[in-house]
Image: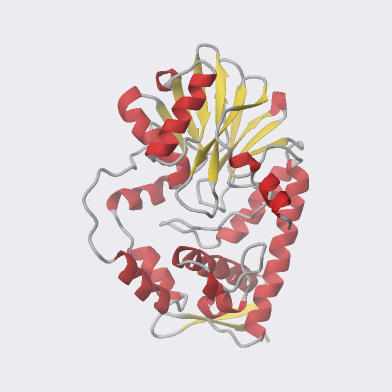
Amino acid sequence: MSDGAVEARHAWIEPGVFEVAPGVHRIPLPLPNDGLRAVNVYAIEDEDGLVLIDSGWALDEARGQLESALGQIGYGFEDIRRFLVTHVHRDHYTLAVTLRRTFGSQISLGAGEQPSLDAILAGDQEAEAERLRRWGAGDLLAKLAEAYGGKAPKTRSPYELPDEWLDGKVEVPLKSRTLLAVPTPGHTAGHLVFLDSASSLLFSGDHILPHITPSIGVEPARPELPLRDYMDSLRLMQSYPDMRLLPAHGPVGGSSHSRITELLQHHEERLEQTAGTIRDGAGTSYEAALKLGWTRRNRDFADMDLFNQVLAVGETNAHLDVLVTRGVLTVTTHEDGILEYAPAK
């Protein structure tokens, strides 16, 4: 990809406020790493106030950019009546919490996120560490202990409970429009998308992204088959009319149905690649991850940072477990708890 093409592809991260539909404004906010680069927050004008889809990460820079962007369309933080949050990940949820502490905005979150949020609030990381061990990633556990084992200074948690749990598929009536919240588990267990059917807009969060595939099951309370859930959720969205895609990461536009088709095809190809690593001698999720290429550039596992290596092992495990349910692979739990996969006979 040429430098110009790369620059054009990432033009969406430039700070500002961009009207993407009448009364709907996209506000990209910065993230503290070079991976996702930015997150799109959508401000919906709702008569005398605002409703925001997602909020951004609780960073001073993000807060300042959001305040500046809202000021450009004549609003301030005090005008935000409600945050509709697609999922509990830090870059979507935590700035809403910090702003609520001062301005009293209401926060709504999918009910499926409650187990993970409870674990976050309790500081419980044992389940995540145990999963890595079972996946054969003891090396990564040791590196994580070395990198994060020291005690950080005590600071106030950026997490709190929401004001409202959105349970199941529910209408969200605003003053200017009605949104439909639809559970789309996979990226997280409680992920929601918001449909504005009258305007043919899909606020897709991380469920459907235009240029990348979202991570699967990165959460403390990981479900049994997050990839199966994700693919089922993609097919569910195909049952709704084709809509204009308003993603959390990436430029606005394009057909939701077209992108869903691409994502489903990608995961079918990835399932075959993952099965191939087991046929070639890998046994654990970690060993399979080492044999796969990563990102659009097909990077080696060793070339990624520690955080993304952890994500990669979890992603690999999600594919392996679907292959077991399809009868392509078998899995054995050894006495030490490590899961080993093999081709089905």
- Residue 58 percent across, percent down from the top left: 39, 40
Q: Is residue 147 above or below residue 262?
A: below
Q: Residue at the spot x=34%, y=53% of the render?
A: 119
Would residue 165 be seen by someone viewing this image from the given angle? no
Q: Please tell me which residue lies in front, 46 or 173.
A: 46
Residue 67, quarter of the rendered image: top left
Q: Residue at the spot x=33%, y=64% of the render?
A: 126
Looking at the figure, which quarter contains the C terminus? bottom right
Q: Is residue 243 above or below residue 264?
A: above
Q: Residue at the spot x=22%, y=60% of the render?
A: 151
Would residue 305 be seen by someone viewing this image from the given angle? yes
- Residue 283 percent across, percent down from the top left: 55, 84
Q: Please tell me which residue lies in front, 332 or 24.
A: 24
Identify the residue at the far front of this view: 3
Q: Is residue 20 above or below residue 296?
A: above
Q: Please tell me which residue lies in front, 127 or 248.
A: 248
- Residue 320 percent across, percent down from the top left: 59, 72
Identify the residue at the far top of this view: 48
Residue 250, quarter of the rendered image: top right
Q: Is residue 248 above or below residue 127?
A: above
- Residue 41 percent across, percent down from the top left: 54, 34
